[in-house]
Image (spheres, rainbow, N blue to C red):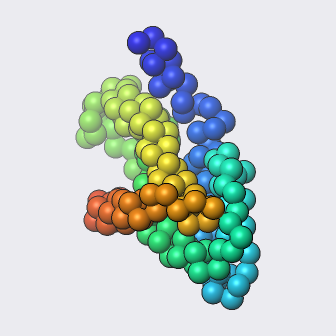
Amino acid sequence: MADRTKAILREPFRAETWRRTAYVVLALPIGLLCIPLALFGGPAARIQRGLARRLLGLETVAPARTGPLALAHALVSAPLNVVAATITLFFWMVVVINIGYPLRPDNNYAQSWGGPTLAGAWAVHAIGGGLGFLLLTPWVVKGFNKLQARLISGFLGAGRTGLLRSTGFALAVAAICVPLSVPVIHQL
């Protein structure tokens, strides 16, 4: 039990967590760039496999030919990448704005949770929003990465095992998260 607790507490501070976060953020613009690249026969599959290899450590054996599969991957992964980037950036923003609560320009601590003192408001925000999201966000990112890696392996790798199930699951996650992301986007 102590090892699990240590792992949970260390996760936000590991370099791997930040590489995973970088992948979630970069997968969206690079994936969108790969749509026209794939349409015109460019190196879309190689670019996306390279990004996954560099940031996720995902070694994917390139098939003899990816052609339409690179386009399919770029199109199928786009909704998931939008949702993953939105949620990840929002969660990390929640960490920063709650731990740095006294620095917020809209800081009306007398009327906020934990008020009427600044110390009370800061404690409530830093522990509830800051620390809570600090410990949760790496695991959410890891979940998105696992699904993104399955799509890369299925579409852009040599094997197609579980591709249909992974595609369906990715689209379902995106469909569920889109309505949940709308209030998040409105808060930005």
- Taking 117 as reference, is 1 left or right? right
- Taking 51 as reference, is 126 left or right? left
Q: Indicate the position of residue 162 as horizontal and vertical percent values.
A: 44, 57
Question: Quick check: 100 above or below 77?
Answer: above
Which quadrant: the N terminus? top left
Which quadrant: the C terminus? bottom left
Seen from the viewer's position, the closer of residues 171 and 186 is: 171
Image quadrant assignment for residue 37: bottom right
Q: Is residue 81 visible?
A: no
- Taking 104 as reference, is 66 left or right? right
Q: Indicate the position of residue 14 as horizontal and vertical percent values.
A: 62, 32
Seen from the viewer's position, the closer of residues 177 and 102 is: 177
Q: Residue at x 45, y 19 (%)?
A: 4
Q: Residue at x 34, y 32 (%)?
A: 128
Q: How many marks?
A: 0
- Taking 17 as reference, is 138 left or right? left
Seen from the viewer's position, the closer of residues 87 and 97 is: 87
Q: Residue at x 28, y 39 (%)?
A: 112
Q: Is residue 46 visible?
A: yes
Q: Indicate the position of residue 136 as horizontal and vertical percent values.
A: 41, 36
Outermost bottom residue: 40
Q: Indicate the position of residue 96 as horizontal and vertical percent values.
A: 50, 42
Q: Residue at x 33, y 38 (%)?
A: 109
Seen from the viewer's position, the closer of residues 93 and 159 is: 159
Image quadrant assignment for residue 51: bottom right
